Image (cartoon, rainbow, N blue to C red):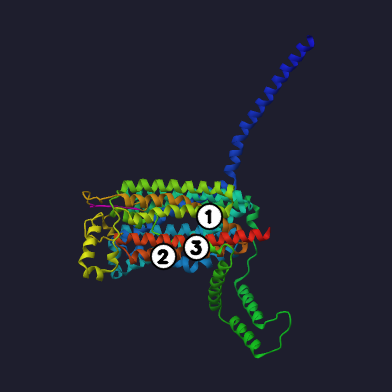
């Protein structure tokens, strides 16, 4: 009995001891939670997220504000905005390979710091110039018979273009190279970081233009310039500190394939070409006239002035960059992603302008843009889940099918009730000679939401009556008494555009990670630079499409062409997926 009591007492003591141990473990765990959180806040991932958020926020504010500033400067005309867009797209198209090659040849910390410094200082100086122009515009117009104004416009566009090029280089360096090294080439961690960066980009794309737009609306353009100037100076300091710390705490970032001097690289290329022209490199070739000519050409090249040699090297670098892009195993996937840029099915000024012609209010459009941002975030979540379950290549296939399936709603909207599409406008001569076609055209045009003018209003009318907010155009003097006979067409259009963003962003993340995993480290920069060039090239095509068919009655044709381009892009990815699976089966 006493033994039982002792046993029970011992058991009770043991129970008390166990409860004390559990309590101590819980307390230690509770104390470790703030410690682990502090470690995460000091870790490289969080620092990259904060740095990326600051950079993306500044970029979104600047891209929105510079378009508005250029419209205000040139008498509310679209000329400067069009010139700026052409310069930006053309510069990245021509210099994308060179930017990527520069990223590859230099140490990572120097590339990041130089790109960050050039980008923020360019925006800062450009903001100062804009503040001076807005403050003393009348005086400036009187100097040099108005030519000083042209000089100021030129300086603003050049500085803004330099800032965009530096931003492109920084994006290639951080989001295409640093992240891969920070995750230790772990595919799961890499997918998580890519998805998080895309979520940050989605949020800043909505909030940043809204913030700077409110400042410009409530205060003035000068205050808006000052706000952007201050943001860039603060962001420069914080991003510089964070990126420097990441570079210090991740030793692998300091390890990079050694760079080679410009002249040495070019001479090595010429020597390889000479040896290839000689045929068999291993055996000495007899001295022939052809060999002498090759050596003489090489000697003539080395005797050229330095500026000519550098120019030839630049041309050779561009050509080699495009060749490197073409021979990548993910070439078809990258081209497929680029084809997705040729579309009017997005929340840009073209689609919002068309929505206004169909009776959609600005408040409703803002709400739809918020919903589209949520669906974009769902796409990033779906990407991480699908990748874990089905693998990266299959995730791209599922995302492609989802994207195309949702866009079929947009195609249906072209032929649905309320659609303003009128094919007779594409053949005005036939329409003029046929009264029947003319009557049909007038009948279809009554579905168009009038903007106070004729029946053939362009998608982007005169912006003298436009307020800009968050990539949405808000018109003054829009008649409110007229509405389309049916909203079925516009509902199907936006339902397709919004739901398609789930598959779109999941597909975008898939291709991004495929390029990160399959491109060798020494070519990571130049290949992604060429990819940026391809994206800008295909983006230019969709603006050319709109210029060719600017009326709301043509928008249905643009929708069909956009879906065709997107279908071609996803078909390219399907071909890549077939090749990748076939290669994996052969290897196993």
**Mark number displayed over residue 532:** 3
Label 3 close to label 1 by CB (< 8 Å):
no
Q: In this view, does 142 lie to the left or right of 13?
A: left
Q: Which residue lies furthest to the front in this view?
A: 436
Q: Give the range drawn in magenta.
A: 472-478
Q: Is residue 562 magenta?
A: no
Q: Residue furthest bottom?
A: 289
Which quarter of the figure is the C terminus placed in? bottom right
- Tag in front: 1 or 2: 1
Q: 10 Å neighbourhood of mark 3: few (<14), some, or many (≥20)?
A: many
Which quarter of the figure is the N terminus placed in? top right
User: Circle 1 — which element?
Assistant: helix
Residue at image coords 21%, 56%: 452
For disc 1, the marked residue is 397
Q: Earlier in the sequence, mark 2 or mark 3?
A: 3
Q: 10 Å neighbourhood of mark 1: few (<14), some, or many (≥20)?
A: some
For disc 2, the marked residue is 540
Q: Is there any visible trace of residue 245 in the rendered image?
A: no
Q: Earlier in the sequence, mark 1 or mark 2?
A: 1
């Amino acid at each position: 009995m006493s033994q039982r009591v002792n046993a029970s007492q011992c058991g009770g003591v043991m129970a008390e001891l166990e409860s004390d141990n559990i309590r101590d473990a819980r307390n230690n765990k509770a104390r470790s939670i703030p410690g682990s959180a502090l470690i995460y806040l000091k870790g490289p991932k969080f620092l990259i997220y904060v740095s990326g958020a600051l950079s993306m926020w500044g970029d979104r504010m600047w891209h929105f504000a510079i378009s508005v500033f250029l419209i205000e400067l040139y008498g509310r005309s679209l000329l400067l905005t069009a010139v700026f867009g052409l310069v930006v797209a053309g510069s990245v198209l021509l210099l994308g390979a060179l930017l990527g090659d520069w990223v590859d040849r230099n140490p990572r910390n120097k590339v990041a710091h130089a790109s960050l410094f050039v980008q923020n200082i360019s925006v800062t100086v450009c903001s100062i110039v804009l503040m001076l122009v807005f403050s003393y515009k009348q005086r400036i117009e009187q100097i040099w018979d108005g030519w000083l104004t042209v000089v100021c416009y030129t300086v603003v566009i050049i500085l803004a273009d330099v800032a965009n090029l530096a931003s492109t280089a920084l994006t290639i360096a951080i989001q295409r190279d640093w992240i891969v090294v920070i995750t230790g080439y772990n595919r799961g961690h890499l997918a998580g970081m890519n998805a998080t960066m895309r979520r940050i980009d989605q949020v800043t794309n909505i909030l940043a233009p809204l913030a700077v737009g409110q400042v410009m609306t409530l205060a003035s353009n000068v205050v808006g310039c000052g706000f952007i100037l201050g943001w860039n100076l603060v962001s420069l300091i914080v991003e510089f500190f964070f990126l420097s710390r990441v570079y210090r705490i991740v030793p692998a970032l300091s390890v990079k394939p050694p760079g080679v001097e410009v002249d040495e690289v070019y001479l090595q290329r010429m020597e390889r070409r000479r040896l290839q022209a000689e045929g068999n490199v291993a055996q000495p070739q007899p001295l022939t006239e052809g060999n002498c000519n090759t050596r003489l050409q090489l000697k003539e090249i080395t005797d050229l002035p330095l500026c000519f040699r550098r120019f030839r090297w630049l041309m050779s670098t561009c050509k080699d960059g495009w060749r490197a892009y073409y021979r990548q195993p993910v070439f078809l996937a990258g081209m497929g992603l680029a084809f997705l840029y040729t579309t009017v099915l997005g929340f840009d000024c073209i689609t919002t302008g068309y929505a206004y012609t169909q009776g959609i209010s600005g408040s409703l459009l803002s709400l739809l843009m918020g919903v589209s941002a949520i669906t974009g975030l769902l796409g990033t979540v779906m990407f991480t889940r699908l990748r874990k379950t089905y693998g990266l290549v299959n995730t791209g296939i599922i995302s492609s099918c989802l994207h195309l399936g949702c866009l079929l709603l947009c195609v249906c909207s072209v032929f649905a009730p309320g659609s303003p599409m009128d094919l007779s406008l594409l053949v005005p001569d036939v329409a003029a000679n046929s009264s029947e076609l003319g009557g049909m055209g007038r009948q279809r045009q009554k579905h168009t939401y009038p903007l106070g003018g004729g029946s053939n209003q362009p998608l982007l009318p005169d912006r003298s009556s436009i307020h800009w907010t968050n990539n949405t155009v808000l018109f003054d003097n829009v008649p409110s008494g007229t509405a389309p006979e049916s909203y079925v067409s516009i509902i199907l259009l936006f339902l397709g555009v919004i739901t398609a963003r789930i598959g779109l962003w999941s597909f975008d993340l898939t291709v991004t990670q495929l390029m990160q995993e399959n491109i060798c480290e020494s070519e990571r920069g130049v290949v992604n630079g060429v990819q940026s060039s391809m994206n800008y090239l295909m983006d230019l095509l969709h603006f050319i499409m709109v210029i060719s068919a600017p009326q709301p009655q043509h928008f249905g044709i643009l929708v069909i062409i956009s879906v065709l381009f997107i279908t071609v892009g996803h078909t390219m990815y399907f071909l890549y997926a077939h090749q990748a699976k076939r290669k994996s089966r052969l290897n196993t």
